[in-house]
Amino acid sequence: MSAPRLRLGVNIDHIATVRNARGGALPDPVRGALLAIEAGADGITAHLREDRRHIRDEDIRRLMASISRPLNFEMAATEEMVGIALATSPHAACLVPEKRTERTTEGGLDVIGGHDHIRDATARLKAAGIRVSLFIEPSPDALDAAKSIGAPVVELHTGAWCEAVTEGSDSAPREFERIQIAAARAAELGIECHAGHGLDYETARIIAALPQVVELNIGHFLMGEALFVGLPKAIAAMRAAMDEGRAGA
């Protein structure tokens, strides 16, 4: 049986980062989302942080009104963000950890220590018809906790593996094995498996060969490549890398 088609979610946060560095309205993340969809993105991801350092509330409203593909609303499991998600009704909400001092998301959600709080937020979002995913470390314990919480989807944090690959570290094979084991465990538990964080063309090609993974969410690398080749070419190259890896699944 062939692996399902691998979806690509494009994260547009850092278009907003560039806009906010100077102020004003440009570059417009909604325009970037529309261009990404035209270039082949299966969905758009946007993270509304507590400090609004990139995506802003109005961006979420405009995305919901403008895009033809699903919006994956990344958010902390706070009362404020749950309220915004319930009022906005995106296709999906991905619960992520969030610290004011971090430059980007560092590690997976603490689904064990924060189990009951995350379970309650998950239940409220699911009751509103929003597909919930949990951004977690690639570990069997985290997968088991996600199952107990009632999440239908997990997104495996691939940052440690991608960093090890970039640095040429001996730990890279071990980190990838953790992802393989976690993806297999997700399938055993009946949880849909996504992956993301730090992926580039090469790591996306490699992880695409894991048949249990059905979606990759990629942002920073694509926005960086777009500075040099344009967003449509960057997305096309990513799509080709993913398809090549999937062909070997």
Image (cartoon, rainbow, N blue to C red):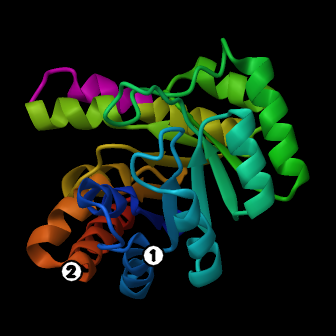
In the image, is residue 40 above or below residue 238? below
Q: Where does the image place residue 28, in percent across and percent down from the top left? A: 37, 74
Secondary-structure class at tag 1: helix
Considering the image in quadrants, where does the N terminus appear? bottom right
Residue located farthest toward the top when viewing the structure as drawn? 113
Residue sitting farthest toward the right: 127
The residue shown at (30%, 63%) is 19
**Residue matched to label 1:** 30
Residue drawn at (21%, 21%) of the image:
171
Q: Is residue 186 left or right of residue 206?
A: right
Q: Is residue 166 left or right of residue 147?
A: left
Residue 135 in sight from this viewpoint: yes
> Contact, CB < 8 Å: mark 1 with mark 2?
no
Counting other residues with Cα less than 10 Å from the Cα at mark 1, is it few (<14), some (14-19), or many (20 or more)?
Answer: many
- Give the residue at x 25% y 28%: 173
The answer to whether residue 29 is left or right of residue 60 is left
Depth order, front residue of 130/55? 55
The disc, 1 or 2, on the residue closer to the chain's N-terminal end is 1
Question: Would you say the magenta stretch is mainly helix, strand or loop?
Answer: helix
- Judge whether 51 appears above or below 42 on screen: above
Identify the element where label 2 is drawn.
Answer: helix
The amino acid pointed to by label 1 is: Val
Marker disc for residue 233: 2
In front: 105, or 82? 82
Task: Please state which amino acid type lies under the numbered disc 2.
Answer: Lys
Name the residue rendered at 69%, 24% in the picture. Answer: 144
Q: Which residues are magenta?
A: 168-178
